[in-house]
Image: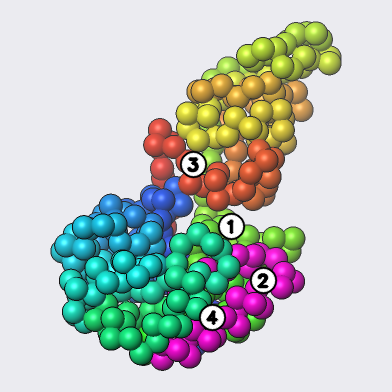
Amino acid sequence: MANWRALGAHAPQAECGAVVKADAYGCGLSAVAPALALAGCRTFFVAHLSEGIFARKLLPEAAIYVLNGLPPGAGAAFAEHALRPVLGDREELAEWAVLSDGRLPAALHVDTGMNRLGLSVPDALALAGDPVIGKAGIDLVMSHLVSAEIPADPLNARQAADFSRLRAAFPQARASLANSSGTCLADDTRHDLLRPGYSLFGGNPEPGRPNPMRPVVRLEATILQVRDVEAGATCGYNARWTAPSPRRLATLSLGYADGYPRAASGRGHALVGGVPCPILGLISMDLIILDVTDASDARRGGTATLIGDGLDIDTVGANAGTIGYEILTGLGSRYVRNYVE
């Protein structure tokens, strides 16, 4: 919970919420959500109605917003579970207003540049003073930053300016713009409620600078077998790797069925006894082969570290040609998860 507290310290005048969609970024909502609540978090964001229903069982008193909006006809389920839809168009707004009649809170989502979900800025401003806002119980106005991880991107300033206009147009509602990286930008992005997600789980909100977040996830795999091969020997499907000299190989009990990306084949590495060991050939569904020639600790029944000990999720993502978000959210159901208080 140190990461949640550290992010909140960027804006002590604001509340720090938590985005826990995608099973808390692959870390397990059933463990993460109660821990955040115990630390003092009172506002949570999920993506789907089903996630919200599950989160409500864990968080009976929290405010829970559902980011992907109000599916047609789903209003009764939102009301039953005291969930708050993030309304992104006039149809959603009208449907929720009829059900809510000012009694059930919701958020208004305004698109300031993502072109993904939300009302346009002009459409949202046109609703200022409209009775539908009160009937829909709008208690939060929010938008999403496009390039917060790139502080110099002029999009940040443009979005911040547009959002300031929106905040002034809806003075009765709280305002939320800052995601994980947005918490590290200027004060004009922080407003009343922070919405960190990725950085809660150890992702770097300031790429290119030292990561201020504490690592959260550690991924280890058992070494099933160690073998010696001669120069010229190949390994894995399609014989993608050929030994340039006599080498020692280790096979791990982990593969792409566990969410470890096949794209890391021949590019990523693991640590054995702290020694970087390259991934060889193609990653299989259930197995990975490492070159452990330089790792004296490699042995059957030992462990290899695929995330941890300095090998962070951003590095693992980059080695697979993707991002740490995908590494986290792809953590599969076959892993045994041990939570350390």
Q: Quadrant of the C terminus?
A: bottom left
Label 4 sits on residue: 163
Q: Quadrant of residue 245?
A: top right
The image shows residue 217 at horizontal and vertical percentages of: 52, 49
The image shows residue 108 at horizontal and vertical percentages of: 38, 74
The image shows residue 43 at horizontal and vertical percentages of: 36, 72
Q: Which residues are magenta?
A: 142-171
Q: Amino acid at mark 4?
A: Phe
- Residue 101 lies, with reference to residue 305, above or below; the image says below
| Foreground: disc 1 or disc 4 | 4
In this view of the protein, can residue 137 be seen by the observer?
Answer: no
Q: Residue furthest right?
A: 245
- Residue 141 lies, with reference to residue 334, above or below; the image says below
Q: Which of disc 4 and disc 3 is earlier in sequence?
A: 4
Q: Which of disc 4 and disc 1 is earlier in sequence?
A: 4
Secondary structure of residue under mark 1:
loop
Q: Residue at x 16, y 62 (%)?
A: 76
Image mark for residue 203: 1
Q: Which of disc 3 and disc 1 is earlier in sequence?
A: 1
Label 2 sits on residue: 155
Secondary structure of residue under mark 4:
helix
